[in-house]
Image: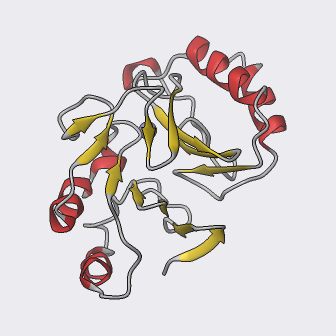
Amino acid sequence: MWEIIGPGILMLRARTGVGRICNSYLVDGILIEPCSYGYGEGPSWVEWIESKNRPPVTAVFLSHPHGDHVRSLRHIAERLKLPVRGPACKYVDAPIQAGEILNGWKVLHAPGHHPQMLCLLKDNVLIAGDAAGGDGWPVLIKPSAGGDIDDHRNSCSRFASMPLDLVLPAHGDLFTNARDYFQKESLRVS
Ligand SMILES: [Zn+2]
């Protein structure tokens, strides 16, 4: 189920090719986008939450309020008896702002895919939400769903200037060629 993908970083991959669920990550006690409950993953999540041997969780994080990210977020947070942290919206109990630190991870605001997109950064590892996508996942979406190409270019240009070693997206596989990825995205014209 969970894979160890880096020092202290666990990943629960979304099923390949399914857009309605997200990769989940567990780092430094933060459970990120635990949202697949209801798509056949429910029993595993409940078992995992109740398991005595699981790593401790002290925070639940939402990157942005799109339906695929919140599908079962509240259910899982309630089972864990933890507030949801993330951008101010109806799914979040305790909003967090850009610049704040959550369990050692810096919160960054990266609009483009969604105006409220928050990412987490620590030790050159970026937890990207939908500010980046693996395997060619299309992160720039139509304006009616929150997309803004100018914001996207600016956010990507900022990420391209950072020394990122690893990007953990909510969809698709993790990747290490961050500079190339973000440079290309920062030059997009559509
Ligand atoms: Zn999204």
**The one of 69 and 166 positioned closer to us in this rendering:** 166
Residue 96 location (% of width, % of height): 34, 32
**The one of 122 and 78 positioned closer to us in this rendering:** 122
Looking at the image, residue 65 lies above or below residue 109 = below
**The one of 61 and 72 positioned closer to us in this rendering:** 61
Residue 155 location (% of width, % of height): 62, 22
Q: Residue at x 56, y 15 (%)?
A: 151
Q: Residue furthest top?
A: 150
Q: Quadrant of ligand 1?
A: top left
Looking at the image, residue 67 lies above or below residue 18 = above
Q: Residue furthest bottom?
A: 52
How does the figure colour the protein chain or chains? secondary structure
Q: Residue at x 24, y 78 (%)?
A: 46
Residue 32 location (% of width, % of height): 42, 54
Residue 140 location (% of width, % of height): 57, 29
Looking at the image, residue 7 lies above or below residue 48 = above
In this picture, residue 138 sits left or right of residue 74: right
In this picture, residue 42 sits left or right of residue 178: left
In this picture, residue 170 sits left or right of residue 158: left
Q: Residue at x 71, y 15 (%)?
A: 189
Image quadrant containing the C terminus: top right
Q: Tally the numbered discs.
A: 0
Which image quadrant for residue 64? top left
In this picture, residue 163 sits left or right of residue 70: right
Looking at the image, residue 22 lies above or below residue 3 = above
